[in-house]
Image (tube, grey):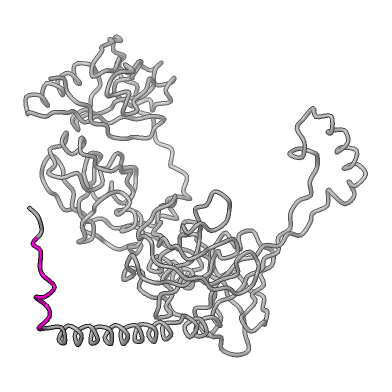
């Protein structure tokens, strides 16, 4: 359909009104532009930068490095230049082999008037001397109060004659994607520097157990490590820690450890000189869709327990195959969430843990241990169970796997405990779902359908029971080199 044509003469009687309307719109637009320009001038970051800059420090560390002993790494072995470099080193061996002093630069910020300074652990790790340079140019030596490699946080202390300017931590959970932020520090050793950007993402995980990073496009470069990430209120919401870059320079993907993680670490370092995190004492994995279906769960959430070594969880009655869905009154979404919830809980606290077991919800009270003690402990030797009477080996192809019961010889070959029962995987069909999900020859299956198995008949019974119950898949507990994990395999139609 053609658009309706309107004659210009239609507007003649209202031409004066049109002119008045146009002039009014122009005046309104001009006023709006003036208002926005005024606001832009008022929103300069200079006042905020001037307010918080005195609390940001440069950190210089000095470390003793062993001298080089040979041409390794300079030229390839067998190179025609190898003799030349060896002769050069022989002439300079008196100097080249002696320990030398190496310096490194980083950033940090003062969090109290009496001189506590926060930075990254990797900035001061292994340092013999630590020197803090303040915004005023004053320099003071620092001592290490405590460090936490898990979150890459270190707490330092300087002794100053007068009170120091400091900044406070803000609530990192309140930061929204798109909020403006300022990064401050000592990039590339150039001295105090300010860069601005926005929060690009929240709750990023890199490689650590307790990672909770704020991603930002504010420029972060070498030397910014340990410096603060500020919100527009001048509160620290992150500690600049890492960048993602193919060339070592900022490409707008930087990561700051969230302040709500840092404050807990700093409080413990200040009080104890070390961290004290809660410890539940379980091995866990995420609940995937196929695992949830195999276990009859309504949703793929929670943390599935694969093993319960000696510790708080075992004492409280938790078992392998339990799915932790609630910890301390808070829902558990996945393993990362549970690890953070447990780690943030006080050592010695008794916590209510809700698990799904055999389709039913159970609540157990667990008194948390200390993770650092558990990580440093040597596992106690256990008495070997009496070796069971050997069963005649029987091989069976099932679920894409070639299986045989464990014997003493197989246990020794696979590094399994003498008392372990189960089926050894001797081969895997490379076209099967089992191969796709990572099962390999040498794996040991100790449970099927959350019940222990010791022979082929046990597994076949579990398959039959799952099919009778209308299950589409069967949950297997697989151990490799002692490490357990659950795998759900689809049953044949």
Q: Is residue 56 left or right of residue 19?
A: right
Residue nearer the viewer, 344 or 108:
108
Residue at point 57%, 56% (across, down)? 249
Residue found at the far front of this picture: 9
Q: Horizontal and vertical percent for residue 361? A: 12, 48
Task: Name the residue furthest right.
Answer: 91
Front-most of 372 and 131?
Answer: 131
Left or right position of 268 against 434:
right
Q: Which residue is located at x 11 percent, y 41 percent? A: 359
**Is residue 5 rendered magenta in the image?**
yes
Q: Quadrant of the C terminus?
A: top left
Residue at image coords 75%, 32%:
76
Q: Residues in magenta?
A: 4-13
Q: Position of residue 51 (x, y in %)?
A: 50, 85
- Magenta span: helix, strand or loop, mainly? helix
Frontmost residue, 239 versus 446: 239
Q: Is residue 223 magenta?
A: no
Image position, residue 138 (x, y; %): 67, 82
- Residue 63 higher or lower than 289, as above or below: below
Q: Is residue 307 above or below residue 443?
A: below
Point out residue 268 in the picture as x, y percentages from the top left corner: 44, 69
The quarter of the displayed image where residue 105 is located = bottom right
Count of all numbered marks drawn on residues in the image:
0
Question: From what the image shows, is residue 172 above or below residue 284?
Answer: below
> In screen coordinates, is 313 left or right of 113?
left
């Amino acid at each position: 359909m053609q658009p309706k044509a309107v004659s210009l003469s239609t507007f003649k009687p209202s031409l004066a009104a049109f002119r008045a309307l146009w002039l009014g719109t122009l005046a309104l637009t001009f006023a709006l532009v003036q208002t926005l320009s005024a606001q832009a001038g008022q929103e300069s970051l200079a006042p905020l930068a001037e307010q918080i800059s005195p609390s940001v420090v440069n950190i210089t560390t000095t470390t003793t490095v062993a001298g080089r002993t040979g041409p390794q790494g300079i030229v390839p072995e067998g190179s025609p230049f190898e003799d030349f470099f060896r002769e050069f080193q022989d002439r300079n061996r008196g100097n080249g082999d002696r320990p030398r002093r190496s310096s490194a630069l980083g950033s940090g910020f003062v969090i109290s008037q009496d001189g506590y300074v926060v930075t990254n652990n990797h900035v001061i790790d292994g340092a013999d001397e630590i020197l803090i340079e303040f915004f005023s140019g004053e320099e003071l030596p620092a001592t290490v109060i405590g460090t936490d490699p898990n979150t890459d946080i270190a707490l330092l202390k300087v002794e100053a004659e007068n009170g120091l300017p400091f900044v406070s931590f803000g609530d990192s959970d309140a930061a929204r994607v798109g909020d403006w932020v300022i990064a401050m520090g000592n990039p590339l050793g150039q001295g105090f520097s300010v860069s601005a950007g926005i929060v690009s993402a929240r709750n990023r995980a890199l490689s650590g157990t307790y990672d909770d990073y704020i991603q930002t496009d504010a420029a972060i470069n070498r030397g910014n490590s340990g410096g603060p990430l500020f919100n527009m209120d001048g509160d620290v919401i992150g500690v600049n820690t890492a960048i993602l870059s193919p060339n070592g320079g900022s490409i707008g993907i930087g990561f700051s450890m969230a302040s709500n993680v840092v404050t807990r670490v700093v409080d413990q370092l200040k009080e104890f000189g070390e961290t004290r995190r809660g410890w539940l004492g379980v091995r866990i994995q995420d609940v995937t869709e196929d695992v949830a279906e195999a276990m009859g769960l309504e949703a793929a959430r929670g943390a599935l327990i694969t093993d319960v070594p000696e510790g708080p969880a075992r004492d409280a009655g938790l078992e392998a195959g339990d799915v932790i869905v609630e910890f301390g009154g808070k829902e558990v979404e996945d393993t990362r969430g549970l690890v953070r919830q447990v780690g943030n809980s006080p050592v010695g606290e008794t916590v209510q843990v809700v698990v799904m077991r055999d389709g039913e919800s159970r609540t157990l009270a667990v008194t948390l241990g200390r993770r650092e003690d558990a990580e440093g402990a040597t596992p106690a030797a256990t008495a070997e169970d009496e070796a069971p009477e050997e069963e005649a080996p029987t091989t069976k192809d099932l679920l894409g796997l070639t299986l045989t019961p464990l014997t003493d010889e197989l246990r020794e070959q696979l590094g399994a405990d003498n008392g372990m029962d189960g089926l050894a995987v001797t081969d895997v069909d490379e076209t099967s779902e089992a191969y796709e999900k990572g099962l390999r020859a040498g794996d040991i299956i100790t449970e099927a359908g959350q019940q222990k198995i010791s022979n082929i008949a046990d597994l076949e019974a579990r398959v039959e029971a799952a099919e009778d119950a209308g299950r589409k898949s069967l949950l297997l507990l697989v151990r490799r080199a002692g490490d357990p994990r659950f795998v759900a395999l689809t049953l044949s139609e």
